[in-house]
Image: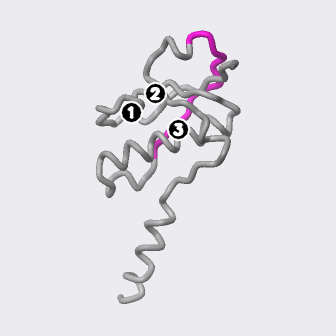
Amino acid sequence: MPRFFILLPALLLGACTYHTSRSSIVVVTDTKSVVENCKALGQVDGQDSSQAIMPLDKTRDSVVARLKIAAAEKGGTHVFATAADIKWKGPDTKGTAYMCSP
């Protein structure tokens, strides 16, 4: 039983999401006009199983981070998603990745 308490912090840290240099430049927006002249790359999802145990504001931050990472993996620069709204309460964690020219 004591081993479980030692492993618990390690398990929780494993659920963290980390930005890379590619994902840190991705913009997540809920304003359609920002991406209207961009090329759609496909759907991305920011869902994670740890959301049930995290406070709502951290959950939103995690969803946005995962959306950025997923868009960067597709070569995207922007994500159109409802999670971009600061008042987002879930449960929609999906968005559309876009490639926008500078």
Q: Using the numbered discs, state the Cα–Cα distance from disc 3 to disc 2 in whole angstroms.
A: 9 Å
Say which element carries label 2: strand
Label 1 Cα neighbours within 10 Å, binned few <14 / some 14-19 / many ≥20: some
Q: Nearer the viewer, residue 10 or 45?
A: 10
Q: Is residue 72 above or below residue 30?
A: below
Residue bearing mark 3: 67
Q: Amino acid at mark 2?
A: Ala
Q: Using the numbered discs, state the Cα–Cα distance from disc 1 to disc 3 in whole angstroms.
A: 12 Å
Q: In the image, which disc is placed on residue 92?
A: 1
Q: Nearer the viewer, residue 99 or 7?
A: 99
Seen at 49% across and 58% down, the residue is: 16
Which of discs 2 and 1 lies nearer the camera? The answer is 2
Residue bearing mark 2: 81
User: Is residue 46 within the magenta segment?
Assistant: yes
Q: Which residues are magenta?
A: 36-47
Give how far across and how far down residue 14 sits, in percent.
Answer: 51, 64
Q: Nearer the viewer, residue 15 or 23?
A: 23
Query: Is mark 3 in CB contact (under 8 Å) with mark 2?
Result: yes
Where, by quadrant of the figure, is residue 91 drawn? top left
Q: Nearer the viewer, residue 102 or 94?
A: 102
Q: Earlier in the sequence, mark 3 or mark 2?
A: 3
Q: Amino acid at mark 3?
A: Leu
